[in-house]
Image (spheres, rainbow, N blue to C red):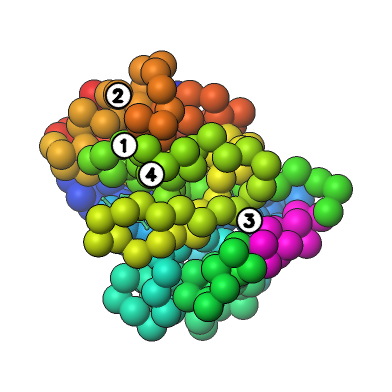
């Protein structure tokens, strides 16, 4: 686990975009394809916009989602919508695999996304993303693995539904085994409100209290990209 600290919002975005681009270049060079999974939330948007300006082998990229809210893809709360807009994915020769979290039967849609992943990575192969982005919530959630829901302990499927409670809509999310299998996890954090969770996520303890702790058991590289206010 390593921590990088950017001084300005622009540097934060540039750093995250640069690390994503490097992982994508390396995967395309080594295997001819790069598979990326994206988180939503506000923090990664400037990084995605920055990445969209970079020279990438877009036709060799496959884009998936780490999590999605149960809203239509046209909603302002749709992680899909924001990422597609920020990365200009609609006008690229890239493959895009949306999580259908607006389906009537969400359980079936989660199973379908699992099938999509198996097909993309090869049925016999590990579902190992080249790079994925994550954030952390002030409650310690990462992806849509919310505290107190038991979701972080789910290890018998690749994709699950989570009911975060409160006024949040249900979510579809990759499960902890998929996040832990990724070659590289980039955790994007900004602002003082995140600092306590950045610290707590780096300390062993119950994962259902702070699900972001699951990254302590990640097999790949985990890099926290912070600003000065969120850095431990
Ligand atoms: C989502 C997420 C979620 C996010 C964190 C941080 O759909 O909300 O993917 O896990 O990464 O909640 O969100 P912010 O960047 O908005 O603080």
Which region of the structure is painted magenta?
111-122
The alpha-carbon separation of the residues under discs 4 and 2 comes to 15 Å
Vertical placement of residue 63 versus 66, above or below: below
Residue on which disc 4 sits? 146
Q: Residue at x 65, y 55 (%)?
A: 34
**Magenta-drawn stretch, dominant element (helix, strand or loop):** helix
- For the C terminus, which image quadrant? top left
Marks 1,3: beta carbons within 8 A: no
Q: Earlier in the sequence, mark 4 or mark 1?
A: 1
Whether residue 47 can be seen here? no
Marks 1/3: CA–CA distance = 26 Å
Instruction: Say which of marks 4 and 2 sits in front.
Output: 4
Q: Which residue is mark 1?
A: 140
State the quadrant of the N terminus: top left
Q: Which residue is at a point 37% across and 38% down the rendered structure image? A: 148
Check contact, mark 1 vs mark 2: CB within 8 A: yes
- Which residue carries the number 3 mark? 35
Q: Judge whether residue 116 is colored magenta.
A: yes
- Measured from the top left, where is residue 150 in percent x and y? 47, 38
> Looking at the image, which is closer to me, 156 or 74?
156
Q: Give the answer, above or below, for where 22 lies relative to 46.
A: above
Of badges 1 and 3, the one in the foreground is 1
How many numbered badges does the structure rendering display?
A: 4
Residue beneath label 2, please? Answer: 200
């Amino acid at each position: 686990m390593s921590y990088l600290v950017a001084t300005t919002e622009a540097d934060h975005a540039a750093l995250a975009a640069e690390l994503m681009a490097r992982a994508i270049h390396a995967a395309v060079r080594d295997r001819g394809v790069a598979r990326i999974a994206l988180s939503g939330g506000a923090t990664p948007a400037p990084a995605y916009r920055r990445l969209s300006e970079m020279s990438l082998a877009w036709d060799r990229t496959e884009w998936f989602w780490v999590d999605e809210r149960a809203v239509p893809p046209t909603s302002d709360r749709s992680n899909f919508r924001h990422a597609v807009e920020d990365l200009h994915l609609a006008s690229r020769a890239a493959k895009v695999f949306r999580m259908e979290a607006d389906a009537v039967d969400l359980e079936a849609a989660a199973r379908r996304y699992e099938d999509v992943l198996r097909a993309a990575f090869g049925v016999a192969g590990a579902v190992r993303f080249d790079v994925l982005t994550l954030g952390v919530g002030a409650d310690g959630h990462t992806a849509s693995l919310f505290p107190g829901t038991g979701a972080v302990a789910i290890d018998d499927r690749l994709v699950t539904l989570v009911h975060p409670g409160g006024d949040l809509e249900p979510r579809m999310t990759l499960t902890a085994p998929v996040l832990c299998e990724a070659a590289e996890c980039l955790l994007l954090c900004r602002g003082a409100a995140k600092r306590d969770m950045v610290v707590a996520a780096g300390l062993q303890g119950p994962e259902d209290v702070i699900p972001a702790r699951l990254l302590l058991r990640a097999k790949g590289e985990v890099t926290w990209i912070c600003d000065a206010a969120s850095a431990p």
